[in-house]
Amino acid sequence: MKKLLVIEDEAPVRANILELLKAKNFNTNEAENGHIGVQMALEHLPDLIICDVMMPGLDGYGVFNTLRQNSLTATIPFIFLTAKADTADLRMGMSLGADDYLTKPFRARELLQTITTRLEKQAILEKQQAQRLDQLRSSITLSLPHELRTPLNGIIGLSEVMIDHFDSLSLAESLEILEDIRASGNRLHRLIQNFLLYAKLEIVKTDSEQVTFFRSHQTLCANQVIAEEAILKACFVNREADLHLQLIDADLQIINSHLSKLIEELLDNAFKFSNTGSPVRITTWQENSFFVLCVSNYGRGMSIEQISSVGAHQQFERKLYEQQGSGLGLSIAVQIAKLYGGKLIIESIPTQQTTIFIHLPLACL
């Protein structure tokens, strides 16, 4: 039985709606004003909310905005009720993201049809998301065990060497083994974090509310973020001299941590698949309303088949280890770029050069 919450300050109207819904076997809760409505929504987590717009104190728009900011109630279908038939009010309600808008007085049939339509739409969205999650679980299940095995074997094997030969190992030898264990542990940790991030990005892109949330963030002075992350990565792999930066300043429509992750993954591949002493370049420029980030290296390169398979579920199904570690990082970069309405383009000459272009939207002024 579906749970519905009715938020309406006019007692007769509220009573009529509740009587109608109960007759149709809906489980109902009621609230006489916006503040109580928010509390009831958080407490009962209804399947759909019917809310009057014009209420004293916290009005319907305020209720909607408050609930949309809470992850527990952000995706609950929301129907506005109003006695005002002004077009501006209608536009405002829908621009906020409400699912529907009914003008008083309305017929019982109209209300029931609207409720049925919204609940059916929500059921379809939930089914699609469940299917995507099942596909993601299946794909990860196929590749995660193999990807984890390499660093995990290193940790176990080196630990056994330490245990079996503890008395005969010199201090220098013990320190070297411990450093290798730590390196394998860090690799394992990063791999797990990347799998979790990829899974999160796959889920986020199916949720319009979360997409809107991420796209509302900005990174100011993006050149500083890019430079700091790039230098940090170059120092980590002892290739500071190979890093060449040519950056313009810009404010971007992207959350700071996602921009840093883009740089981390693109440089990880650039350094991994090029030799020490060869340049790795990051160049940025502006094209219309987009910021273009270009990362190039002169190393192994990628085949047409490898390029075409980046960024899709087939990466998991093809088993990421076939691309010797390049697939997951680039897949994450593709998903981040798409999340913000951008794109990733790869140009490569096998055994010679790879250049990756990422287009990201400039911040709205």
Image: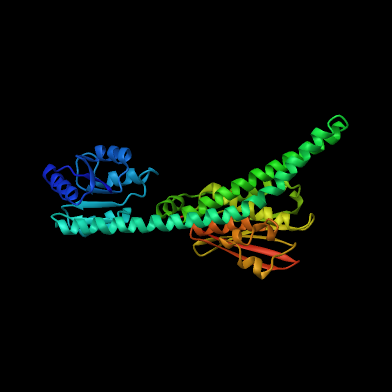
In the rendered view, would you say 116 is above or below 231?
below
Query: Horizontal and vertical percent for residue 293?
Result: 60, 59
Query: Horizontal and vertical percent for residue 22?
Result: 18, 47
| 286, 54: nearer the viewer | 54
In the rendered view, would you say 76 is above or below 282?
above
Q: Is residue 218 visible?
A: yes
Q: Is residue 252 visible?
A: no
| 43, 8: nearer the viewer | 43
Residue at 45% x, 53% y is: 215
Quarter that holds the C terminus: bottom left
Q: Is residue 154 left or right of residue 319?
A: right
Query: Horizontal and vertical percent for residue 134?
Result: 49, 55
In the rendered view, would you say 164 is above or below 114?
above
Residue at 56% x, 60% y is: 313
The image quadrant of residue 304 is bottom right
Numbered label tally: 0
The image quadrant of residue 129 is bottom left
The image quadrant of residue 306 is bottom right
| 179, 148: nearer the viewer | 148
* Residue placed furthest toward the top: 167
